Amino acid sequence: MTEALREAQFDGVVNLADVVFTEAQIKAAVDGIAARVRADYGGTPFTLIGILKGAAVFAADLMRALGDYPLSVDFMVVNSYNTGRKTGSDVRLLKDLDHNPAGKHVLLVEDIVDEGLTLAYLVNNLRSRKVASLRACALLDKPFHRKSSVEVDYIGLEAPDEFLVGYGLDWQERFRNLPYICKLNGVSLG
Ligand code: IMP
Ligand code: MG
């Protein structure tokens, strides 16, 4: 990280702190998940469903890591908290899939699982739509404050109990474009 970026202040409220996962660490995690997905699906076509906006970067890298694997891509947009731990159980669907997932093998792609309520909502939503099978992957796992026992089939990296930004993760829509993941100081997780 450049010194200028390290020093960057946004609204005088938060500042970027240490890099938690470098680009190289993220790439190794993405490649590892892709290898496991390839082996587990064994050539069976599936639909990769990216959860926007947080998983946009991860989903793009994961699908490229899957190379010539036969898959289709769709996206859903759900609300997620941006300024703190404010998810609650009222996850809202802001944009649905373009294509009916009934009868399809589905791989859900999430950025991070924290309380697990977002993923639980998505799993329930897709199961009720009669998918042929459903697996979930998340680049990051923050298992410290789970409120749902939802299962995550593929996890890239174990995250610390910190508010993280970068590689798709935001604070008030900022920092999604950082190619690495870092800690954000000044954000209350309470
Ligand atoms: P959950 O319902 O608490 O598991 O919420 C998961 C969602 O909250 C993720 O998809 C993210 O959008 C968001 N989220 C959770 N932890 C963080 C974080 O450390 N930084 C940024 N967003 C986060
Ligand atoms: Mg998200």
Image: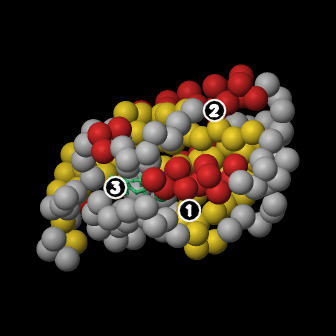
In front of the other: 61 or 127: 127
Q: Can residue 176 be spotted in the picture?
A: no
Q: Residue 165: give its label.
A: 3
Q: What element carries label 3?
A: strand
Q: How far apart are marks 2 and 3 (CA)?
A: 23 Å
Q: Are there few (<14), some (14-19), or many (20+) residues within 10 Å of tag 1?
A: many
In front of the other: 184 or 103: 103
Q: For residue 84, what is the image quadrant?
A: bottom left
Q: For the residue with label 3, is its CB less than 8 Å from the closest atom of ligand 1?
A: yes
For residue 142, above or below residue 119: above
> Residue 177 location, x and y as percent?
43, 60
Q: Is residue 53 found left or right of 128 in the rendered image?
A: left
Q: How far apart are marks 2 and 1 (CA)?
A: 19 Å
Q: Can residue 34 be spotted in the picture?
A: yes
Q: Is residue 6 found left or right of 60 in the rendered image?
A: left
> Residue 89 location, x and y as percent?
43, 61
Q: For the residue with label 1, is its CB less than 8 Å from the closest atom of ligand 2?
A: yes
Which residue has dot 2 on it?
34
Q: Is residue 152 found left or right of 23 in the rendered image?
A: right
Marks 2 and 3, the one that precedes in the sequence: 2
Q: How far apart are marks 1 and 3 (CA)?
A: 15 Å
Q: Say which amino acid is labelled 3.
A: Val
Q: What element carries label 1?
A: strand
Q: Residue 52: give its label.
A: 1
> Residue 148 location, x and y as percent?
43, 45
